[in-house]
Image (cartoon, helix red, strand yellow):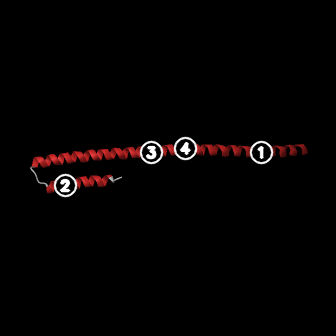
Amino acid sequence: MINKGTLVLGLLVGAGIGVLLAPEKGKITRDKLKKEGNCIKDQITKDFTEVKEDVSKAAQSGKDKFKENLKDFTAKASHKTEQAITFLEKQLAILKEKNKTLQQTS
């Protein structure tokens, strides 16, 4: 893809050279410059629209990727939490047994 700034610069340089190399009556030259100016304006508008769409697509893609990563993280965190709870329950059972033993010896 052509760099948009380069394209606009090329259009401006081309319009300037055209005016210098083809001297005509003032009205004709002004009309040509007006036409070139409108073409440049239209191209810039089109380019900005494309850039806006590209940025919007990139933002949406990033948002979708973030949601996907968040979902994966949540699933992994839930799994690890379950493992931690299971471990703590086992430790609690061991402590209860030790406590029973201590209560029987008292």
The picture places residue 32, in percent across and down from the top left corner, at 16, 47
Disc 4 marks which amino acid? Answer: Glu
Q: CA distance from mark 2 to mark 1?
A: 83 Å
Mark closer to the chain start, 2 or 1? 2
The picture places residue 40, in percent across and down from the top left corner, at 25, 48
Horizontal side of 15 relative to 77 (left or right) equals left
Viewer-proximal residue among 70 and 50: 50
Q: Secondary structure at mark 1?
A: helix
Q: CA distance from mark 2 to mark 3?
A: 38 Å
Q: Secondary structure at mark 2?
A: helix
13 shown above or below 42: below
Mark 4 or 2: the one toward you: 2
Mark closer to the chain start, 4 or 2? 2
Crowd band around label 2 with a 10 angstrom C-alpha radius: few (<14), some (14–19), many (20+)? few
Q: Is residue 39 visible?
A: yes
Q: Which mark is residue 59?
A: 3
Mark 2 or 3: the one toward you: 2
Q: Secondary structure at mark 3?
A: helix
Mark closer to the chain start, 2 or 3? 2
Q: CA distance from mark 3 to mark 1?
A: 46 Å
Q: In the rendered picture of this protein, how many numbered marks are placed on residues?
A: 4
**Residue most toward the left?**
25
Location of mark 4 (residue): 68
Disc 2 marks which amino acid? Answer: Gly
